Image: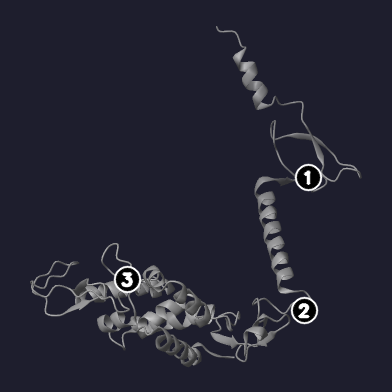
């Protein structure tokens, strides 16, 4: 068991490996790895198949050697606030640039949306280029609380997607269980015990230890329990208990009175006889339509 930040060196190592092999900037390598569950092998295979298509699909094409520089022979004007003569602008590799004040507000709003901020795109409408740690750092500053949140969301994405780690399911616990290999992670019966909250859980599926049942069997059982729970909720909302045998009954016709419960040993569900004193509403409607007009 370890803290999530203890996995930062492993994340940085994978980013560095991809940067060296594919000759792309570190921010682009970070974006690409996050889209392929932090698997270098899957990323390299897709990159070799069609590099340009992959870079464009994941919003780092301009960042990887195809940058567009914003025009320099014009008055600096922010495309968001339309302020003229801005002292300092921040440009994306796609060529879109905005003033630092607008960048600051945009970054705060993007990070406030939660973990999805790691997939934030350029503020310019319709531009698919991804915003990376470079833009967030320049617009907010390294010590800004929102920039630190962004780095936390990055490491959370790594913990949840890299295939070798799992959050402790204990209430409020932030510890992470790590497997030494993919084979150990996928093996049946691998149990981890948190050294902080003492919660034991299956390393493969995250449920309570369930040997000798397999993880797929537990998944089916959990689904069955959820379905039965939904059925029970419907029964409670749409039926009442028979006052004699206490079985659940559904009213589907007639008035609110019943004459007797005819349940016997051969019938699991009771059969209710409607009373003969009150006229059912449907019959009452028919009767009223046949009344003579005065």
Q: Which residue has dot 2 on it?
A: 211
Q: Which residue has dot 3 on it?
A: 129
Residue drawn at 69 percent across, 78 percent down: 208
How far is disc 1 from disc 3 in space, using C-alphas?
67 Å
Question: In the image, 121: left or right of 33?
Answer: left
Residue drawn at 67 percent across, 80 percent down: 186
Residue 27 % position (x, y): 36, 82
Residue 243, numbered circle = 1
Residue 3, numbered circle = none
Tell me the quarter of the image containing the C terminus: top right
Q: Residue furthest right?
A: 265
> Residue 129's quadrant in the figure?
bottom left
Query: Closest to the observer: 137 or 187?
Result: 187
Say which element carries label 1. Answer: loop
Q: How is the image coloured?
A: one colour
Task: Please state which of the two labelled residues, at mark 1 or mark 3, is closer to the viewer.
Answer: 3
Residue drawn at 60 percent across, 79 percent down: 169
Residue 70 % position (x, y): 17, 73
How far is disc 3 from disc 2 in space, using C-alphas?
47 Å
* Mark 2 surroundings within 10 Å by alpha-carbon count, few (fewer than 14), some (14 through 19), many (20 or more): few
Q: Is residue 29 above or below residue 288?
A: below
Query: Closest to the observer: 53 or 14?
Result: 53
Which of pointers 3 and 2 lies earlier in the amino acid sequence?
A: 3
């Amino acid at each position: 068991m370890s803290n999530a930040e203890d996995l930062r060196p492993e994340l940085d190592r994978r980013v560095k490996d991809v940067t060296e092999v594919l000759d792309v900037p570190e921010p682009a390598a970070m974006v690409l790895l996050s889209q392929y569950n932090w698997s270098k092998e899957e990323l390299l295979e897709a990159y070799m198949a069609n590099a340009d298509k992959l870079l464009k699909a994941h919003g780092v094409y301009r960042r990887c050697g195809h940058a567009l520089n914003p025009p320099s022979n014009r008055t600096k004007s922010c495309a968001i606030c339309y302020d003229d003569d801005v002292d300092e602008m921040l440009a994306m590799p796609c060529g879109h640039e905005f003033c630092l004040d607008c960048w600051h507000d945009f970054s705060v709003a993007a990070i406030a949306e939660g973990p999805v901020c790691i997939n934030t795109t350029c503020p310019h409408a319709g531009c698919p280029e991804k915003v990376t740690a470079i833009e967030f750092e320049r617009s907010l500053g390294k010590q800004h609380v929102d920039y630190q949140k962004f780095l936390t969301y990055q490491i959370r994405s790594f913990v949840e997607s890299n295939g070798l780690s799992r959050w402790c399911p204990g209430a409020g616990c932030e510890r992470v269980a790590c497997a030494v290999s993919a084979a150990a992670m996928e093996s049946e019966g691998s149990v981890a015990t948190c050294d902080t909250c003492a919660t034991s859980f299956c390393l493969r599926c995250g449920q309570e230890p369930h040997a000798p049942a397999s993880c797929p069997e537990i998944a089916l059982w959990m689904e069955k329990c959820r379905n039965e729970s939904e059925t029970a909720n419907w029964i409670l909302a749409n039926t009442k208990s028979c006052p004699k045998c206490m079985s659940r009954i559904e009213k589907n016709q007639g008035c609110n009175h019943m004459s007797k419960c005819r349940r016997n040993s051969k019938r699991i569900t009771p059969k209710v006889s409607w009373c003969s004193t009150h006229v059912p509403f449907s019959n009452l409607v028919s009767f009223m339509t046949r009344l003579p007009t005065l």
